[in-house]
Amino acid sequence: MGKNKGFTLVEMLIVIGIMGILASVMVVSLSHMKKTALQAQAQSLVTEVATALNILLQQERQWPDEILEYSKETEGGCVPEVCAVFQSKKLMDISTYKQGAIGTTINEDSLDRFGILDPYGRAALKKVPKCQDAGRQIPDGSGTYKDHRIQYRVDKNYDGFVDSSEGAPKGMKVRASVIVWSRGPDGKDAERAGGKFPGDDRLSWSVAGTAE
């Protein structure tokens, strides 16, 4: 009567090694897919905000800061007050204010309560749903929640360009009515991080069309 032949130690080690390699490949692949998905979401959001701003200008002949009657807010990007303009004009599917009107109570349960955050900021905020401090540091070291606001600058003098005198990054001059960008996973503009656009930022304009 024959004996059942089992796996040798060497065979088991080979199988375990192959399984380890496959697991590593899957982790890398999933990580890449997640990164690509977040980049696509950020690009889509940047495009949506740029479209909303251009429609707002066509409808109201004003930029959000002019409607709000103070100009410094755009320096902070899509802050809650700017969100309220989009919300009241039904230009974007966001929920910043409970009544949907400028000056009413901020909806503390909304993911837009700190303004329009990029996908990286929103993903981090989902992990701390009770957080009410936009300046709170994100645990992974990617800055604060307000660092992940979608940024925009507008052509305030209506000369057909957005340049550094209008709040665009230093040395930039873009032929557009408005430029919009996401600061990417690190929460920093590419130039602030020592590089140049686009880096890991997502832009509403073509870098090729940028004059420096």
Image: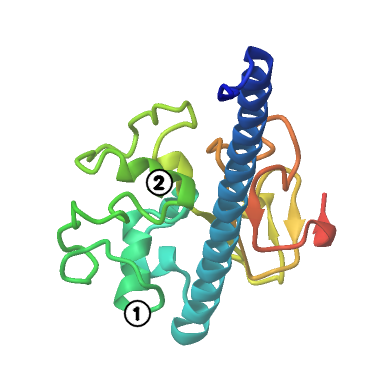
Total numbered badges shown on the rendered structure: 2
Residue beneath disc 2: 123
Residue 98 image position (x, y, % from top left): 16, 65
- Residue 111, compared with residue 170, is above or below; it is below
Residue type, label 1 = Lys
SS of the residue under disc 2 = helix
Which mark is drawn over residue 89? 1
Extreme-top residue of the structure: 9
Quadrant in the picture for the N terminus: top right
Residue type, label 2 = Ala
Viewer-nearest residue: 31 or 153: 31
**Looking at the image, which residue is at 44% across and 82% down?**
60
Left of 69 or right of it: where is 162?
A: right
Viewer-nearest residue: 180 or 111: 111
- Residue 127, compared with residue 85, is above or below; it is above
Q: How is the image coloured?
A: rainbow
Q: Are marks 2 and 1 in contact (CB under 8 Å)?
A: no
Left of 29 or right of it: where is 105?
A: left
SS of the residue under disc 1 = loop
**Crowding near pointer 2: few (<14 within 10 Å), some, many (20+)?**
few
Left of 133 or right of it: where is 154?
A: right
- Residue 64, compared with residue 171, is above or below; it is below
Answer with the quarter of the image where residue 203 lies. bottom right
Residue 81 image position (x, y, % from top left): 32, 59
Residue 69 visible in image = no
Of marks 2 and 1, the one in the foreground = 2
Answer with the quarter of the image where residue 41 lies. bottom right
Viewer-nearest residue: 68 or 31: 31
